[in-house]
Image: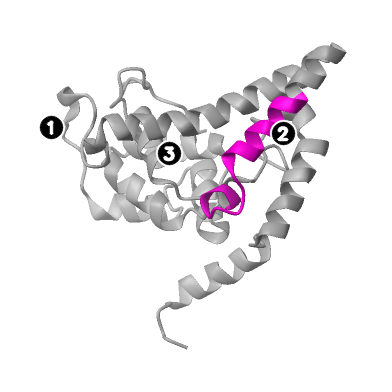
């Protein structure tokens, strides 16, 4: 043992081992399971926080065990099939899933065109926003001790499993920057450190969007009710 983990990290990593199985064969099995059994109902289930409402394929994509091209090709094939069959629900599900893949690719174009977005907001008028740099608030958010059950549950799930639903990512990040006024770069860095599917470009796009730092993002004054 190299002694690189503290006790909290050991317990978290043990849970990660139960929740995720790395390797090409596991990713291929997960891909087949989603496309054949869950993609059809993606449009109805994608916003549900419990169960297998999303693909859960992002970690495999992140570590190169699953290519985006293969995933896109299979989803597109299903989209065409369901369209020809007149399956409206299936076609809508495939369309929404392909759009989600498109957002991932869009984040790469954004960062390629504006490489400074990892360090500062795309909108210059927010460069000097008076964020609250109180470390105790940031610590409470990280540890799931804000007093808001939904937010706290999401942050504890993140630490325990290395993954949270995209809707939950929006909820906890919005709470951080709009309720606690935590600098969005702090939240972005924490997601990078804890998410099993941590993706720099997606991370930048998500946190800049939710903090109102993008032209088409949430307005900073728009508040999402954490209850």
| Residue holding disc 2 | 74
Q: Identify the secondary structure beneath mark 3.
A: helix
Q: Identify the secondary structure beneath mark 2.
A: helix
**Mark 3 against mark 1, which lies toward the viewer?**
3
Identify which residue, 25 or 97, lies in the foreground.
Answer: 25
Up-down relation of residue 107 to residue 28 (above or below): above
**Mark 3 against mark 2, which lies toward the viewer?**
2
Label located before the other in sequence (3 or 1)? 1
Up-down relation of residue 199 to residue 16 (above or below): above
Label located before the other in sequence (3 or 2)? 2
Q: Pinpoint residue 156: horizontal percent, then vertical percent.
A: 52, 55
In the image, the segment drawn in magenta is 60-78
In three-dimensional space, the C-alpha distance between marks 2 and 1, rounded to whole angstroms, equals 45 Å
Identify which residue, 55 or 71, lies in the foreground.
Answer: 71
| Residue 65 located within the stretch drawn in magenta | yes
| Residue holding disc 1 | 128
Residue extending farthest to the right is 85
Q: What residue do we see at 12% from left, 32% from top?
A: 128
Q: Pinpoint residue 198: horizontal percent, then vertical percent.
A: 46, 50
Q: Pinpoint residue 183: horizontal percent, then vertical percent.
A: 26, 41
Question: Is residue 182 shown to the viewer in this render?
Answer: no
**Crowd rating for badge 2 (residues with CA inside 10 Å; few <14, some 14–19, many 20+):** some
Up-down relation of residue 68 to residue 146 (above or below): above
Residue extending farthest to the bottom is 1
| Residue holding disc 3 | 202
Horizontal arrangement in the rendering, residue 96 relative to residue 122 (left or right): right
Label located before the other in sequence (2 or 1)? 2
């Amino acid at each position: 043992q190299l002694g690189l983990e503290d006790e909290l990290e050991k317990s978290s990593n043990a849970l990660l081992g139960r929740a995720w199985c790395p390797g090409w064969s596991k990713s291929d099995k997960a891909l087949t399971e989603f496309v054949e059994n869950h993609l059809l109902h993606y449009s109805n289930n994608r916003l549900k926080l419990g169960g297998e409402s999303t693909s859960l394929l992002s970690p495999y994509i992140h570590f190169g065990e699953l290519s985006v091209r293969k995933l896109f090709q299979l989803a597109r094939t299903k989209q065409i099939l369901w369209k020809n069959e007149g399956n409206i629900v299936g076609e809508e599900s495939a369309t929404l899933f392909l759009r989600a893949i498109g957002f991932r690719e869009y984040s790469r174009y954004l960062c390629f065109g504006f490489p400074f977005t990892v360090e500062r907001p795309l909108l210059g008028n927010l460069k000097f926003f008076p964020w609250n740099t109180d470390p105790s608030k940031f610590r409470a958010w990280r540890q799931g001790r804000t007093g808001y059950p939904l937010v706290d549950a999401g942050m504890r799930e993140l630490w325990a499993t290395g993954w949270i639903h995209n809707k939950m990512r929006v909820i906890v990040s919005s709470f951080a920057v709009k309720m606690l006024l935590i600098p969005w770069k702090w939240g972005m860095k924490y997601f990078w450190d804890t998410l099993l599917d941590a993706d720099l470009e997606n991370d930048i796009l998500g946190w800049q969007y939710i903090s109102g730092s993008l032209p088409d993002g949430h307005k900073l004054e728009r508040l999402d009710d954490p209850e």
